[in-house]
Image (spheres, rainbow, N blue to C red):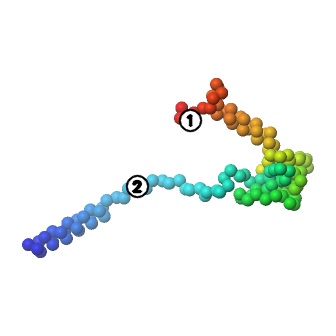
C-alpha cells in the first residue's frame, strides 16, 4: 500500500510539472523607455541677462560669462551683454533677455507676451480658467 501511494504521489507531481511546462507565459506589455531625470528641468541652456550680468547655462550649470563666447551659428556674446549677430548687427541684452544656443534672441517683453497669450488660451470666453476634463 505504501508503495502504491508513493507511486501515485510521484505520478501526480510529474503530471503537475508537465502541465506547467506546456502553458504559455502571459504576453509582456510594451513599456515606453524611461527618460533620464533632469535635476534642473526648468532651466534652459543659453545666455540670459540677470541683474546686469550675462549668465551662461549649459547642461544645468549656470556661470557668469567672463570672456567672449562664440556660438556655432556665428553669434558672439560679450560679457557686458553686447550680442554680435552672424550678419554683423549688434544688440544689447537687457535684464530678462535670453539668447538660445542656436542664436535666437528673446526679449523679456517677448516672453511676457507669450506668457499672456498662453494664459489667454487657457481662459474661456468669460475670462475664467478652463477646467480640464470637459
Alpha carbons under labels 2 and 1: distance apart = 34 Å
Residue ID at (86%, 47%) = 93
Residue ID at (79%, 59%) = 63
Local crowd at mark 1 within 10 Å, few (<14), some, or many (≥20)? Answer: few
Residue placed furthest toward the bottom: 3
* Residue 108, horizontal then vertical, whole percent: 80, 42
In the rendered image, which quarter is residue 7 located in? bottom left
Quarter in which the C terminus is drawn? top right
The reply to whether callout 2 and callout 1 are in contact (CB within 8 Å) is: no
* Residue 8, horizontal then vertical, whole percent: 15, 68
Residue carrying label 2: 27
Residue 122 relative to residue 92: left or right = left
Residue 85 relative to residue 38: left or right = right
Residue placed furthest toward the front: 51
Residue ID at (71%, 57%) = 60
In this rendering, is residue 113 above or below 58? Answer: above
Residue carrying label 1: 132
Amino acid at each position: 500500500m505504501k508503495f502504491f501511494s508513493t507511486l501515485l504521489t510521484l505520478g501526480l507531481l510529474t503530471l503537475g510539472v508537465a502541465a506547467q511546462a506546456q502553458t504559455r507565459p502571459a504576453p509582456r506589455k510594451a513599456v515606453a523607455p524611461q527618460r533620464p531625470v533632469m535635476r534642473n528641468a526648468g532651466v534652459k541652456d543659453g545666455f540670459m541677462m540677470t541683474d546686469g550680468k550675462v549668465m551662461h547655462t549649459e547642461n544645468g550649470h549656470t556661470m557668469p560669462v567672463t570672456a567672449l563666447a562664440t556660438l556655432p551659428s556665428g553669434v558672439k556674446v560679450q560679457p557686458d551683454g553686447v550680442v554680435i549677430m552672424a550678419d554683423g548687427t549688434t544688440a544689447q541684452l537687457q535684464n530678462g533677455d535670453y539668447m538660445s544656443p542656436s542664436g535666437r534672441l528673446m526679449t523679456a517683453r517677448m516672453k511676457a507676451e507669450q506668457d499672456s497669450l498662453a494664459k489667454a488660451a487657457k481662459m474661456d470666453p468669460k475670462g475664467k480658467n478652463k477646467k480640464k476634463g470637459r
